[in-house]
Image (cartoon, helix red, strand yellow):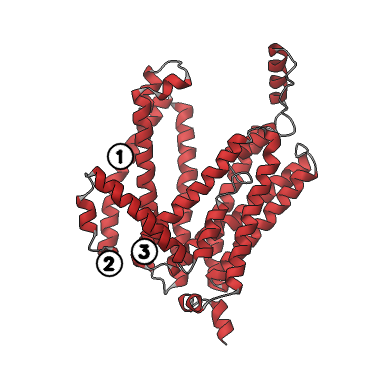
Amino acid sequence: MVIYALKNAGRTSTSALLLRPWFIVLVIAGAIERLAGLALGVSMERDWVVLLAGTNRPVALAQANAMLNRLDLLCETVGASVFGLLLTKYDIVTCLKISSALMICSFPILVMLGQLINSVSCHALDSSRTPSDESICADLLDVRKIVQNGLSSIKHGWNEYKQQTVLPASVATVFLNFNVALAPGAIMTALLMHRGMFHFPSSNLSISEKCLQISNSCLTGISPSIVGAFSGLCSVMGLVATFISSSLVKRVGILKAGAAGLIFQASLLSIALTVYWAGPISQRTPLLIFLASIALSRLGHMSYDVVGTQIIQTGVPASKANLIGGMEVSIASLAELVMLAMAIIANDVSHFGFLAILSVSSVAGAAWMFCRWLGNPTDEQRELFIFDPHFQLQAT
């Protein structure tokens, strides 16, 4: 659909574009791909890894989670770099055809590797099947059944999600998704390109004067190389965190490792927020401190991403892993959507400080909630994490 649009679609208004058949097909295809990707991610991260590594082997589970995140980050980095290299040599249609061919060829490989993993592990992945799986597969073409099953799953998933023992760890993960301002992304890029250098022209100027003022402002923006270096450093920090998290779990246990990651992230984001409010970040020193604090905070973010996943894997029964995992992903996506909606409402770059305060507050709230849960353990929590050094020291 994208190739068709590039070849045949001319300049059209936004309202006309939304009604084009190819655009509707593109949106539907993108939605289905996104749903399938989330389903595969939840199954692999919350179900497959636990069945293969075992909840009673915390170090092995931590290493498996770290490897998954490490490969994910490497593929994103390498994939973006290769696609960018292809764009410098070929036109965009050719690049899209190459990427589509790679995805199509990787599908049978993915299926065969899944079957190979299952056979090598003595069919460990089959243990998560329930008697209702066959009836669900039979109802895939019944629209009424799909709606009924969907509503029932949402209601049942929400009830199970609220009752899980590791709920604070899961809610902390959701809180981290509220941080859309002090993280690499479109909002941060907009700030770096405009804050301190870009000012919206006064309304009493003529159109030509407004255009001239905007063009002059854009010419004084932060160098794109700094923006690119910041994004690259964030990716490197995320990759380094996957190595740190597994060793941290081995030394202090998964619970203290999770608390350390959240506190570290909250502390560095607080420094970044202080630097932002202390003065204009258009100056070199404040800018570097601001960006370095955010980049280093990715160490804590990705560490907790790995450790938090393991905590939920340990605390959630295998029969409910997909249900609760899917509900957590849904709530986290909703949290991110709420923050992006607020960013759309506060679309002026001058409102970035408000979004930054909300971001830091959400991360600090996640750290406080997790530490409070860690400091007031229940008997069920002690039983779940009996192998954790934190509770072994308390027992002695």
Q: Amino acid at mark 2?
A: Ser
Crowding near the residue tagged with mark 1, few <14, some 14–19, many ≥20 C-alpha atoms within 10 Å: few
Q: Position of residue 34 (x, y in %)?
A: 39, 43
**Among the two numbered marks 2 and 1 on one chain, the one whose residue lies closer to the N terminus:** 1
Q: Position of residue 100 (x, y in %)?
A: 34, 35
Q: Dividing the picture into quarters, in which one does residue 365 lie?
A: bottom right
**Among the two numbered marks 3 and 1 on one chain, the one whose residue lies closer to the N terminus:** 1
Q: Amino acid at mark 3?
A: Lys
Q: Nearer the viewer, residue 306 or 15?
A: 15
Q: Position of residue 355 (x, y in %)?
A: 65, 43
Dot 1 falls on a residue whose secondary structure is: helix
Tell me the residue at 48%/52% (across/down): 331
Residue bearing mark 2: 127
Tell me the residue at 61%/46% (across/down): 183
Residue bearing mark 1: 104
In this view of the protein, can residue 44 be seen by the observer? no
Q: Taking 274 as reference, is 373 above or below it?
A: below
Which disc is residue 320 wearing? 3
Dot 2 falls on a residue whose secondary structure is: helix
Q: Please identify the residue farthest to the right as the structure is shown.
A: 279
